[in-house]
Image: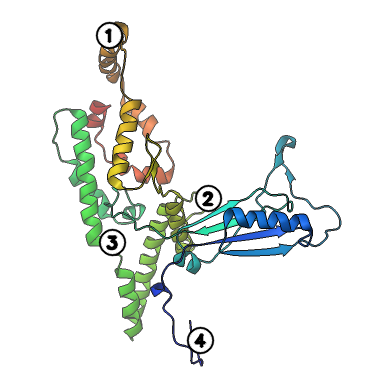
Amino acid sequence: MGSKGSNLPEVEVAQQPYLPMSLLCINCQGLGKPQAVKDLCELIGIHKPSLTATCMIWGIRGINMLGLMGKKGQSVEEILDRFSSQSEWLALFPAVRVSHIDNNLSDHLPILLKCFEPRLAQRRGRRKRFENLWALNNQCKDVIKRGWEQNIGANEVDVCMEKIDSCMCGLQEWNKREFSHWELQKCKEELKGATSPGSRKELLANIRDWQKKEEILWWQRSRVDYLKHGDQNTEWFHQHANGRRSTNLIEGLRGANGSMCSDPDDLEIIITDYFSKVFKSSNISFVDEFALIRIADIIDHDSGRWRNDMIDHILLPVDGDIAKSIPLCNHWPETELCGIM
């Protein structure tokens, strides 16, 4: 990209074609030795990297500690060779994979970085989950209460599932009206043209409020328990959530015939066939069939043992974030919950 005062044209990086590539980095000892050159050429021939970077380790005097002693005298292995990048680079190369290669060049392992052509993610529906930022609004309790008043279903379990689904649908509709993601940008734009101290003060308060909500949103997405929200770490939470999404991406599944499939329809068939075989019953004896029939009677008998204090003992001792993920636990009528349990 061009800099100020230069005649170079501005280059739009996003418009450039995506080129899959691989980078091999080697930190070795005695790079000029024949054996090191031979091993290096062998690695390049196997992995065929687009670019190779080598560096040489100088002689180290004293103890070169590559391991640490942990508790009870056990050794701790630490990854010394790794890549680091900025968020801007990750935005340009979202599909990357880093692997370590065994070799005899050094006590350091060569690291291979592969950049793949990003796959177009399949459009999927929004997950139904409780957002922690909803709890900041006093209207949340009323929305849940209206959804819980639904009473549709043939039995207690069906009624409970319908109530939960009604609550979630109501919360999602309420979320669209109350938590628009464009409100923060709108407040920032209005702040640029605000002149009176009163309006600027009000806009700044709204901006801080929306920034807090945005941080809570991405903190929940990142699933980072060791770092709490409230310290303006929204960008870090956002990067961590995107990184976890990339790590959990399943590019394809191998079918029974050994072929790799990535088409959504083929994946559905593979998953259905696999679990159908896993849970399929075969060679059921008379004793096993009689035991399965008796299970329903035992469950009906034991279900009447649940008391209110027992249910409280199960639901209450949970982590604060988990409790917010189960918002209905604070609004369930005791009689209905006891009937379900």
Residue type, numbered disc 2: Tyr
The residue located at (83%, 52%) in the rendering is 63
Nearest the eye: 14 or 167? 14
Per the model, the C-alpha gap separating discs 3 and 1 is 54 Å
The residue located at (64%, 54%) in the rendering is 43
- Tell me the crowding category of disc 4: few under 14, some 14 to 19, or many 20 or more residues within 10 angstroms, Cα based: few
The residue located at (34%, 80%) in the rendering is 191
Residue type, numbered disc 4: Ser
User: Do the residues under discs 1 and 4 have CB atoms within 8 angstroms?
Assistant: no
- Tell me the crowding category of disc 2: few under 14, some 14 to 19, or many 20 or more residues within 10 angstroms, Cα based: few
Residue highlighted by disc 2: 226
Residue 67 location (% of width, % of height): 74, 46
Judge from the rendering whether residue 100 lies leftward or rightward of residue 335; answer left or right. Answer: right
In this rendering, which labeled residue sits more in front, label 4 or label 2? 4
Per the model, the C-alpha gap separating discs 2 and 3 is 27 Å
Residue 8 location (% of width, % of height): 48, 88
Residue highlighted by disc 1: 290
Q: Which quarter of the figure has residue 304?
A: top left
Residue 115 location (% of width, % of height): 49, 60
In this rendering, which labeled residue sits more in front, label 1 or label 4? 4
Element type at mark 4: loop
Label whose residue precedes the other's in the sequence (4 or 2): 4
Residue type, numbered disc 3: Phe
Per the model, the C-alpha gap separating discs 1 and 4 is 80 Å
Image mark for residue 191? none
Image mark for residue 3? 4
Residue 125 location (% of width, % of height): 26, 51
Element type at mark 2: loop
Label whose residue precedes the other's in the sequence (1 or 4): 4
